[in-house]
Amino acid sequence: MNRTEFIIATAIVLFVAFALGWFANWLVNRFTRVTKAEIGELDRMAQSLHEAEETRDQAITYLQQREAELTNQISQTEAELRAAMEGLRDARREAEELRSYIERQSQSN
């Protein structure tokens, strides 16, 4: 094989490799092409996802507000309970003092 034949054989091999690569690229693009319907579907899915995220954020905000309200109510109820228990304790002590006073008065008479 002389120099000219070698150059021609190399050129043919390179051209065949180029043609096979181009055909493979075309074939891959043909099968993986995204249609307008698929793009529309992706847009609808993205919009639905965005709406779902907004709804989730609103729900989280509502739950946080509700939790704060309930925590406040619990604090108020506990404060009222403590006040009622102190009042009951004072009333029991006063009743006991009155019983003692009445017993002393009845014993001295």
Image (cartoon, grey):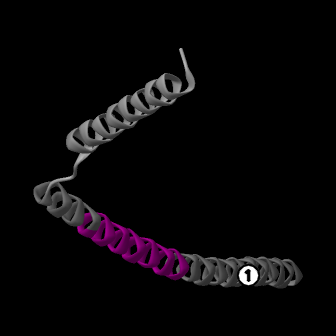
In this rendering, position of residue 74 left or right of residue 91:
left
Point out residue 42 in the picture as x, y percentages from the top left corner.
23, 59
2 and 104: which one is in front? 2
Q: Residues within 10 Å of mark 1 (few under 14, many from 20)?
A: few
Q: Write the start and end of the magenta stretch as one range.
A: 47-69
Q: Residue at x 26, y 42 (%)?
A: 26
Residue 19: percent from the left, percent from the top?
32, 35
The residue that appears at 54% across and 80% down in the rendered structure is: 68
Residue in front for this viewpoint, 8 or 15: 8
Q: Is residue 68 above or below residue 7?
A: below
Where does residue 40 sit, x and y in percent of width and height?
15, 63
Magenta span includes 3: no
Q: Height in image: 31 above or below 83?
A: above
Residue 49 within the segment the image draws in magenta: yes
Residue in the foreground of this view, choosing between 28 and 8: 8
Amino acid type assigned to the residue bearing label 1 in the image? Glu
Residue 57 sits above or below residue 6 on the image = below
Viewed as shown, does residue 19 lie left or right of 93? left
Percent across and percent down for residue 101 are 82, 84
Which residue extends farthest top? 1
Q: Classify mark 1: helix, strand or loop.
A: helix
* Position of residue 71 in the picture relative to residue 5 (left or right): right
Q: Majority secondary structure of the magenta segment?
A: helix
Disc 1 marks which residue?
Answer: 86
**Which residue is at the front of the view, 5 or 94?**
5
Quarter of the figure with residue 103:
bottom right
